[in-house]
Amino acid sequence: MNRFAELLDRLAYEPGRNNKLRLLTAYFRDVEDPDRGYALAALTGALSFKHAKPGLIRDLIAARTDPVLFAFSYDYVGDLSETVALMWPKTPSHAQSAQLLPRKVGDVGEHAIGHNNPPPTLTEVVTTLRMLGKTELPKQLSRWLDELDETGRWALLKLVTGAMRIGISARLAKTAAADLGGKDPHEIELMWPGLTPPYPDLFAWLEGRADKPVNLDPAPFRPVMLAHAIEDTDFVNLDPADYIAEWKWDGIRVQAVSGRDTRGHQLARLYSRSGEDITKSFPDLLPSLHLAGAIDGELLVMREGRVQSFNVLQQRLNRKVVSPKLMKDYPIHLRAYDLLGDGETDLRTLPFAERRERLERFVTKLDDPRIDLSPTIAFDSWDALTAARRDPAAAGAGEDAEAVEGVMLKRRDALYLPGRPKGQWWKWKRDPHIIDAVLMYAQRGHGKRSSYYSDYTFGVWTSGESGDELVPVGKAYFGFTDEELLQIDRFVRRNTVEKFGPVRHVVHEPDQGLVLEVAFEGLARSTRHKSGIAMRFPRVSRLRWDKPPREADRLETLERLLKADASHTPTLSTEMDADSRQEKASG
Amino acid sequence: MGETRTGLVVDYIIQMRPQDILMPVAAGLCCKPGGFHIDPVRPVERAVITHGHSDHARSGHGAVLATQETLDIMRLRYGDNFAGATQAVSYGEEIRLNGISIKFHPAGHVLGSAQVAVSGKDICIVASGDYKNAPDPTCAPFELVPCDVFITEATFGLPVFRHGNAADEIKKLLGSVALFPERAHLVGAYSLGKAQRVIALLRAAGYDAPIYLHGAMEKITLYYESRGIVLGELRPVRGMKKADLAGTITLAPPSATSDIWTRRFPDPVTAFASGWMRVRARARQRGVELPLVISDHADWDGLTATIEATGAGEVWVTHGQEDALVHWCKAKGLAARPLDLVGYGEEDDSDPLPAAEDAQA
C-alpha cells in the first residue's frame, strides 16, 4: 500500500504527461503481482466495491480527536480525507493494538504481542474490501489507518471513498503498462474487456514471459480511426470524386459494440474513442443495440427529432448515477457513420464505400428510433462542398444544422486503420468565432510553463456605472506560439499593476494594454461568470499589438451571438470538465 | 495569570507577575526591568536576538545581544553597521541586566539559534524563538529548559502537521533524481538553515555529487562551512551550461523556483523543502511538483511534547496557529493565551532576492 500511496502522491503533483507515464511505468516495473495489477485496476476505474461514505470517515476521526482541533484542522486543510490522514493519532502502543485489534477477523493471536503490524498491501486492502460487510468496514478501516503512514492513509481514504482525482485517465495507465513491454497501448485496449484484475496474464505478456492474452470478449473495443485537420492548401491535390463527405456532428464519438457470449447471451457495450467503457452512463441506449456488430458513430441528445447542441449533451456526460429523469429529459441517440463489424465479420479491411453500404443495410435492419444514419453530403466540386459547409441547413442538415461543426471527408477506398493515417480521413471544421478581447489577468502555468505567465483572463467592454469597463469573459492558455508566449510573458512582467498571490493584474486601460484575438467554438449562458457568458475552447489566435484596447469588442457583440447561436441552449451550470474537453478537443 | 490575581496583596508586592518581566508591545516582546526587547520588529535601544532569520533579526538596533553565529549572520546579511554595538553570548552563559538574568540555550532551529531564558527573582520565562526538537546535523540540538512560563511559537500548531523523518523525504528526492536523470532537480529551501540541512541530509544519504547553489545561498552556506559544518562539494549554478545541469540538484530560495531564473535548467523538477508541504493545497498553490516535508520548526507533536516537558504552568503562544495550541494547553489544564505579536512570518516573504540574481535570467 505504501508504494502505491507514494505513486499516487507523486502523480497528484506531476503536471507532465510523459513524466506521469515514467512514474507509472517505473511502478509497474518495480512492484510485483498482484499489487501492481490492483494498482492498474484502481487507476483504470476497474475496481468496484461499496465505497465508504464521508460520514463514516468523519465518525472515525471524531471518536479519536478533539472536535475543536479537528475543526481548526479541517478548516485549514480543506479536504476531509487529507485532514483525517494527517491528524489520525498514532497507535497508542503496539502491545495494546495487538491485543485489542486483531489484524484479520479470525486470526487473533497470529501477531505476537508487542509486534508492530506491518502496513497492509494494496492486494490485502482490495481483496478484503471486496468481501467485507458494511458493519465490519469501520473497524477494518481504522485498523489500516493505524498501520499506515500519512501518505498511506491519504491514499487509502481516496481509494475507499472512490475519489482518486489525481489526473490520471484509464488510457494513461494502460499506456504506462504498455510501455513496460514496449507494446502499443492499442493492443491493451483490444484485449482489455477480456481481462480481469489483477491481470497476471497481461503483465506476464508485457514482460515477455507468456503469450499475448486472447480477448474472448464478445463485445471488444476496436482502436478508432482519426482524421487530419484539412488545410486550404490540401485541396489542390485532392479529387472530389475520391471522397465521400458527411457532416461532422458536435457530439461525442463512440463505438457501440454488440455480440453474443459463449452462453449465447447478447451483450452490448459503449466505448469512448479512447476505449473507455462508458456503457454504464447510457443504459437507455443498450436495448437499441440488439444486432451483433460494431458501430462507429456520434452520441447525441435528440429531442423531437432534432439534434441538440453539445451544451445539452453535456448534461449526460461523466455521470456516475443516471436517473430516469435525466434519461427522459436528455434522450440519447446514436448517429452512425461507420460499421466495423457485422455479426461475426470484421469489416475493417473493406474500403469505406463498401462499409458505408453495409452500414446502411445494418441500420435499416436495426430499425430503431434511437439509431440513425449520418447522411452523406452530395457534392461534385470543392466549391460545392465549401458552400455546404458554410450553410449546412440548406445543404441537407436542415434543422440539425446547429449541431454541425463542420464536414468530414473520407476516401472511398480507405480501409479502417487505427490511429491517424495520412490522407484517408479529413476533418474540415466550421470557422471559429473570433473576438478581440483585452488581457486583464495573467497567471503562471504549470510544469514546463511554471516560470511563464501563460494563463490569460481576457475581457470585453461593457457599460458600467462609471462609463465603459472591462468584464472578464474567458480564460485561454493555448493557441499562441512559443515565441508569442515569450512576448506575452514579457508584456505581463513589465505591465503588472498589482499581484494577488499567483495572479497578476495586467494593465488594461482604454489606451494601455494588450488586445488578444480570441477564437472560440461557441457560447453558453453561465451563472459562474460575472459576464453571464461561458466560452467553449477559447484560445489566443493572434496578438493584436496594433490595436488599442479601446477598440476591442463589447459584451453586446457576444450577447447577440449567444442569441443567434443558442436560442434553445440551457444554462451551463458546470464547466466542461477536462475529460469531455479532451474528448472533444482532438475529435 | 489567574493564580497571581487571586493571590494576597502582600504576595503581589513580593511576587513578580510574568507580565512584569516580559510583555508584548508594538516593537515586540519587551522586558521593562531589563531594558531590552526580544526579536524586536522595529529599531530599539537594546535587542536580544534569538536567531538570524530576517523576521526575527532586523538591522538598526542600538545594541544587540545574541550568539556569535547570529551576530555573524546578521553582519553577512545587513553589513557591518547592522547595529550600534554587539555583544556575543554563549549557550549557558548568564548575563545580568538590572536584576534580570538572561541565559541562552540552544533552540535547534538554525545555526546559532537560541531560546532566551529571562528570570526575575523567582520566576523564569523562556522565550523559545523558533525551535525544533528533531535531529539536525547543522546546529546544536534543542535543549529543554524547565520554566514557569514558556513562550512557544505555533508555526505548525495544528495536529495535521507532523513532519516525520526528514531522511525519508531525502530518499524521495534521490528516487526522483534516479528516475529522471535528464532533468534538473530544483529544491526550494530557505537560505539560512534549511538549505544547509538539506545538503547535510543529502550527504548523510550517501549523495556525493556536487550540489549546486543559487547565488543567494552562497554566503550563508560558506559561513556554515567556516563553522565546521561539512557539506561536501558545492558549486555556484551561475555560468553552468543548461545541458550540464541534467541529473543535478540545485538549491535555491523558494521564490526563485518559479522565477525566470529556472529557465536555465533542463525540464526542472520543482521541489520545496518545508513543513508546509504536508498540506497538499499549499504545495499545489506554489506549483511544487515534489514536496519535501522538511521543517526547521517543531511539528504538532514536538510543540505539545515540549510544552509538557518544560513543566511550565503558563504558556504564551505566538506566531502561527495560536488558537489550536492555546486550546490544547487549556484542555491540559495549563493557563495559556495567544501573544499578539505582529511582524513574524515566513522568512522568505521578507527576503527579496538580490537584484543581481533576479536580473540574471
Image: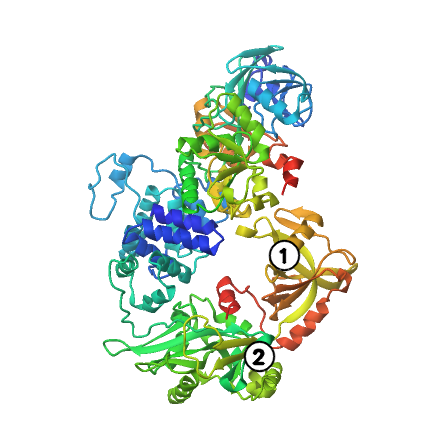
Q: What element carries label 2?
A: helix
The residue that label 1 is drawn on is A483
Is residue A173 among the parts visible in the rendering? Answer: yes
Q: In this picture, is B306 found above or below A424?
A: above
Residue A109 percent location from the top left of the image: 20, 41
Kindly identify which chain the residue marked by label 1 belongs to: A
Task: Answer yes or no: are tags 1 and 2 on the same subunit.
Answer: yes
Quadrant where the image shows the N terminus of chain B: top right
User: Which numbered disc, 1 or 2, marks the residue closer to the eye?
Assistant: 2
In this picture, residue B230 sits left or right of residue A192 = right
- At 40% from the left and 37% from the top, the residue drawn is B168
Earlier residue among tags 1 and 2: 2
Which of the numbered marks, if any, corresponds to residue A492? none
Kind of residue sitting beneath label 2: Phe
Q: In this picture, is A504 found above or below A463?
A: above
Quadrant where the image shows the C terminus of chain B: top right
Residue B343 percent location from the top left of the image: 63, 32
Residue A495 percent location from the top left of the image: 71, 50
Residue A482 occupies quadrant: bottom right
Residue A454 percent location from the top left of the image: 61, 55
The residue that label 2 is drawn on is A235
Q: How crowded is mark 2: few (under 14 residues within 10 Å), some or many (20 or more)?
A: few
